[in-house]
Structure formats: structure tokens, C-alpha cells
């Protein structure tokens, strides 16, 4: 198996690019100074994330295909969290020269497959040498004529509802980190989140007032909505879905675990919460996040302090 | 001076975000799951680059402000090289926790100022911890109703012309690497390229058939146009601007040095080459790149092989 250093930049890029089907939104794909992506709405939704080996993924816990799926998923979810339809990803990839070329190819297979799940394409990117593997993922999307679903629209009286798994990735990670046998359902969830991308359109159609994806943990992320909207959000613990597979710490994982990328939205009184969503709290006057009326303090994930 | 680790992710992001003026194209700036950027053309031009410390910049040679200027410039230039007007940057920044927070703030000042030169804004991004400083820059732009200026439109009979400095960054780097005294004009050019962003609109208005920015070296980058267009490009060495400040190796720096980000375009017969552009060659039948009729071989910069 050749390394990327033996293969060289241009052959590697050619091999990676061949693995990327280009959907109809891609007017000009990889190979020029920049890509050209359809933005029929006249605006484009855009978000970027960095993933660094050892911090956001481990090669001994996850294969390149799953790392690609996960890297794509977390950015596609950010686009959907604005109520938009994902159209394209751009990928910046830093690789040590000793990385097997096949590792990079499988990473791209994962990126391409997750894009397909969301109706998007990998439209371009950059590959460079580095000491650490780093992935920079930019996702673009189209709002289809609607206003973006921001974090600032929640109003007292709204219901808070979630769509997708909570706590699975966190419970899987805890078992992997402890070196213990873990239900495959949990370790798979950690390796490969499956955001329900249809949630953006569902929330928009139902008249949601705010929407975001849960990347850092339900309570911490609800704190962003509470702060941006100038409201309090109270979560009812008994309403939080905690399947038995999450184990004895299930509620904690569901309330504070990140990386599953479910979507949490607020729905005004009278707006029917869409099918598949679980109501787990309410928006009230005040500030901050409470669980069964008790304040939730700071102490979520911090990239530098952890 | 506090480090970014002492400051923590949220305060750091707040301090960085305050340094980013938001232009009229930014409908929703930093702080939500994604930004929303105007794309009045109905398409968006998008490109991404990774810059890694020790490979693309050195903290002992360049201050954070210049690194920010340069990182923004190389991506804004890619958008302009499509004939588009830059609208927004997204910045992914990986930092060791021991990095002084002020270093990151000056980096953002540089990013913001270079954006202002090009009429764009930093609309969002991501900050994470890592062992190496890595910058992921995504640039977006608008085509204003015109077709993109790709690398594949050059035709035999076209003139080849350049707009902007050639060889300055390379000559400056050679002097910095040799530890020698260097004219400030050269070392400044290495630390801070100044792409003439107006070149995209000039080339489009003049009916250019192909356009790109010179990032890897004139001859190597002309090779991309030759290959994509199925033509030969012959450069006349006596026509290449080689100011005396480039020193005895000036022609070599001008032909093979990268990172100045001038723009090189092809102009059909009868289309007047715009003011400020220097004609330095011609497109003919054939393939590859020649200098005074002699073939230029491979051996440009390769990120993994170097």
C-alpha cells in the first residue's frame, strides 16, 4: 500500500476526486481555482468545522470511512439546523506523508456517502502535508426562499422538541474509553452519527421558531437558544427519551452528551409538533436552562479547557 | 498575556468575533449554526485551503497579522480567479492551548483587513485545540451573472497576460531562509502578498477566455491552463517582468516562484488586453508549457514530496 508521500499530491487528488459523484447543484466541481454551486435562493448557508486527530477522532477507534461519514454529518447537520437543504461540501485535508493512500480514499468514500444521505456533493477542497491529520469541512446549503431558522426565535409558551438520538454517542464513547464491551448500537453511534436530515424541512413546515443541532450536549446547546432568544428553557427529565441501552447513566448521557447531532427546535403554541419529534420541555420567561425547574450550571465541553 | 487555554473557547470566540466587521453581503454573521451570505447570482463560488504552521507559514518569520492577511489573500484570490467578486470567508482555526490569545486576535485583524481590501467579510468559523496551528480558510463569491472564468477556455491565438507581482515572495523567502539581509520589498511580499483583486473584473470585462491566480509558480500554473484547455502555452522570457530587486535569480523566481497570487489570463485575438496587464506569451496548438520554445518539465512544488 503506497503512502500519500510516495504517491504525491497530484495523483492523490486525482484518486480522491474520482470518488466524488457530483450532484445537480454542482455547476463546476473539483479541478479549478474554485467550485461553482447552485444557490437558487439568492443566499447561501455556509458553515465550517475543523476535526483534529486525537481530539475529534481516533484512528484506533474509528476507521477512515466512519471518520469521513462523521465529519460530513456534523457539518451537514449545521446546514439543516438553519432550515436549509445541504448542497455541497468543501474538504480541506492535512495528512502526514506516511499515511496510507488507501486511508485517505476510504475517508473520501465516507464523506461522499454521507453527502448522498443528505442530497449534497463534495464539490472541492485542498490536500496538504502536516504532522497531524486534520479535516476542515465546509458545508453549503440553500434556504429555498424561507427565513433561516436561527437560535434567537424562541418565545415563552413555545414547546421544545427533539428529533433524533440523544446520548448514544456519549454512552458509546464512555464504553470505548473504559475499554469495556459495549453494545454495537452505542459504539456505532459514536463512530457514525446519523442525523435525521429531514428534520430541517419538517421544522420549517411546522412553523418552528428556533432550531439547532445538538453537537455539544442537549442542555448546553439549549443554553445557546435560551441566551440568543432571551428566554428560559425548562426540560422535563421524565420526557427525555432514555432507552435502556444507554445504561445506568442514560439520563446524564442524554442531557449532556454531544455528537449525535439530533435536532432540537421550539414550536409555538398551536403549531403541531411534527411526527417523529419528542416534546421534552417548554420555553418560559427568564433566562438559562433548567431541568425540572432546577438550574443547569456551566461545565459543558470546552475544546481548550478539557 | 493570557493563553487561549486559560481564556477558554467561548471567551476566545467572542473576542475574535468582535474584530470582524460584517459587510452588506452577510445576512447572518457569526454566532449561529451557520452563516447566511448573499448569492444574488443564484450560484456561489466556493474554495477552501488549509495552512499549516511550519509548512505554509512560520511564526518566527511572520507575525499573526501578516499570516492572517496572507491566508485570506490566497483564498480571496481563488475566488477572483473565477471572475467572481469575493463576499465572505469562513475560518477554521486550530490552536495549541499555550498560544497567546493576543496572537489569535492579531491573526483575525489580518483576516478582517485583507477581506476589506477585497470587499468581503469573515462571516463565521470554528476554533479548536490542536498540537499544531492550522488555518482552514473558505472563501465565497458571486459571479454577477457572468460565466465563471475557468482554466479550460484558452484557445490557440490567445495572448497570455499577467496582472500583479511575479517572483517577489519566492525571492523574499530565499533570502529569509538563507538568513541574509533582504530588501524589505521582498520580505514584505513574502509575508503579505497583495493580489490585485480588481483583476477578475478587468479580465471578465475584456473577454478573457481563461483566468487563474499564480499560487504555485507561473510555469506550473500555466501548465494547468494548458492541460485543462488542451493547448500549448509559450512564454517569452524577455517579456516576463523581472525587476532588479529580484536579484540575479530574478527570472527563475518570476517563472517558478509561487505565493504572490498575481492573476494570469488568456485573451482572444482582437480583445484588448486591459491596462495594467503585461503580455508575456501566447497560446498555440499542442500541449504543455514552453519558455522561448523549449519545454518546461515537471518539478514544481509538491506538498508531500518536498
Image: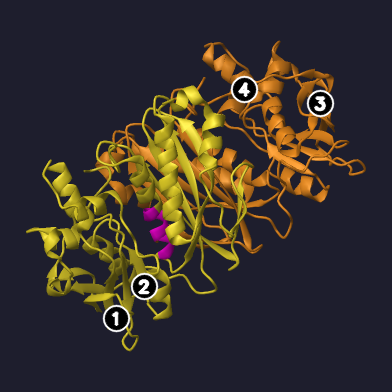
Chain colours: A orange, B yellow
Dots 1 and 3 on the same chain: no
Residue positioned 23% across, 73% down in the render: B233
Callout 4 environment at 10 Å: few (<14), some (14 to 19), or many (20+)? some
Which mark is first along the chain, 3 or 4? 3
Quadrant location, the N terminus of chain B: top left
Residue B90 x/y as whole percent: 50, 48
Query: Could you tell whether A168 is left or right of A208 in the image?
Result: left
Q: Give the residue number, with chain letter if any, for mark 4.
A: A300
Residue positioned 42% across, 29% down in the render: B130
In whole angstroms, how far apart are the C-alphas of marks 1 and 3? Answer: 68 Å
Instruction: Give the label, 4 or 2, closer to the camera.
Output: 4
Q: Does dot 1 land on a helix, a strand or a loop?
A: loop
Dots 4 and 2 on the same chain: no
Disc 2 + disc 1, Cβ < 8 Å: yes
Query: Could you tell whether B239 is left or right of A271 in the image?
Result: left
From the image, give the main secondary structure of the stretch colored magenta.
helix
Which mark is first along the chain, 1 or 2? 1
Q: Quadrant of residue B206?
A: bottom left
Amino acid at each position: 500500500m503506497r503512502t500519500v508521500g510516495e504517491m504525491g499530491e497530484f495523483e492523490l487528488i486525482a484518486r480522491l476526486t474520482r470518488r466524488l459523484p457530483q450532484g445537480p447543484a454542482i455547476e463546476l466541481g473539483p479541478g479549478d481555482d474554485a467550485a461553482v454551486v447552485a444557490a437558487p435562493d439568492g443566499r447561501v448557508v455556509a458553515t465550517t468545522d475543523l476535526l483534529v486527530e486525537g481530539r475529534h477522532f481516533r484512528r484506533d477507534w474509528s476507521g477512515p470511512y466512519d471518520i469521513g461519514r462523521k465529519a460530513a454529518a456534523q457539518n451537514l447537520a449545521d446546514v439543516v439546523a438553519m432550515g436549509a437543504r445541504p448542497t455541497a461540501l468543501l474538504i480541506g485535508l492535512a495528512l502526514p506523508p506516511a499515511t496510507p493512500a488507501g486511508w485517505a480514499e476510504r475517508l473520501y468514500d465516507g464523506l461522499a456517502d454521507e453527502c448522498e444521505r443528505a442530497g449534497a456533493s463534495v464539490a472541492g477542497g485542498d490536500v496538504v502535508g502536516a504532522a497531524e491529520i486534520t479535516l476542515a469541512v465546509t458545508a453549503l446549503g440553500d434556504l429555498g426562499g424561507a427565513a433561516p431558522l436561527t437560535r434567537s426565535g424562541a418565545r415563552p409558551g413555545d414547546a421544545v422538541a427533539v428529533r433524533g438520538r440523544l446520548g448514544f454517542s456519549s454512552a458509546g464513547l464512555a464504553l470505548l474509553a473504559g475499554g469495556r464491551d459495549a453494545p454495537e448500537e452505542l459504539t456505532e453511534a459514536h463512530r457514525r452519527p446519523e442525523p435525521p436530515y429531514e428534520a430541517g424541512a419538517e421544522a420549517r413546515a411546522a412553523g418552528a421558531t428556533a432550531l439547532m443541532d445538538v453537537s455539544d450536549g442537549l442542555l448546553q446547546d439549549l443554553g445557546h437558544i435560551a441566551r440568543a432568544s432571551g428566554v428560559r428553557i425548562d426540560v422535563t427529565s421524565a420526557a427525555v427519551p432514555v432507552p435502556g441501552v444507554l445504561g445506568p447513566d442514560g439520563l446524564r448521557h442524554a442531557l449532556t452528551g454531544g455528537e449525535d447531532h439530533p435536532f432540537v427546535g421550539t414550536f409555538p403554541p398551536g403549531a403541531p409538533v411534527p411526527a417523529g419529534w419528542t416534546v421534552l420541555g417548554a420555553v418560559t420567561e427568564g433566562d438559562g436552562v433548567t431541568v425540572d425547574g432546577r438550574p443547569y450550571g456551566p461545565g459543558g465541553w470546552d475544546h481548550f479547557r478539557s
